[in-house]
Image: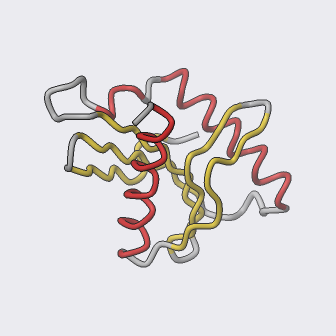
Amino acid sequence: MNNRDKGSAGEEMACRFLEERGIRILERNFRCRAGEIDLIAMDGNVLVFAEVKYRRSPEERFALEAVNAAKQRRITRSALVYMMLRGVSSQTPCRFDVIGIAGRKLFHIKDAFGI
């Protein structure tokens, strides 16, 4: 399995996890010039932008560490582009989540960073 396949499998696992908690997936792998957002979803009335990080095993560098300040800026800019393109009001509550998958363990950090 190559890295892209592993990433897709991790995103699928994250989607199932969120859906089991009543969070509705709107879009996967939104891409624009500013960057990419792995998952975009609705949690009640909150628009969620989620970054999924996968690591093969728990012994590897912790998956959540990969969402550094530069990555956060790219995700934030991409979220603003998404909202503009989709006509989402600037008054819509939003949050940025990180879903880390290490081996078979999944970690969901709600509101991991802000704008």
Classify 60 as above or below 7.
above
Residue 17 in picture, x, y percent from top left: 35, 65
Q: Nearer the viewer, residue 92 or 23?
A: 23
Classify 16 as above or below 31.
below
- In the displayed structure, does residue 26 sit left or right of residue 51? right
Q: Quadrant of the N terminus?
A: top left
- In the displayed structure, does residue 7 sit left or right of residue 45? left
* Residue in view at x 30 percent, y 34 percent: 55
- In the displayed structure, does residue 30 sit left or right of residue 54? right
Residue 37 in picture, x, y percent from top left: 61, 44
* Residue in view at x 25 percent, y 29 percent: 62
Which residue in the rendered view is the most extreme toward the front? 1
Residue 36 falls in image quadrant: top right
Exactly how many numbered labels are in the figure?
A: 0
Residue 24 falls in image quadrant: bottom right
Q: Quadrant of the C terminus?
A: top right
Residue 101 in picture, x, y percent from top left: 30, 44
* Residue in view at x 85 percent, y 53 percent: 85
- In the displayed structure, does residue 74 sit left or right of residue 72? right
Q: Nearer the viewer, residue 50 or 16?
A: 16
* Residue in view at x 78 percent, y 44 percent: 81
Colouring scheme, one of rainbow, by chain, secondary structure, one colour: secondary structure
Residue 113 in picture, x, y percent from top left: 46, 40
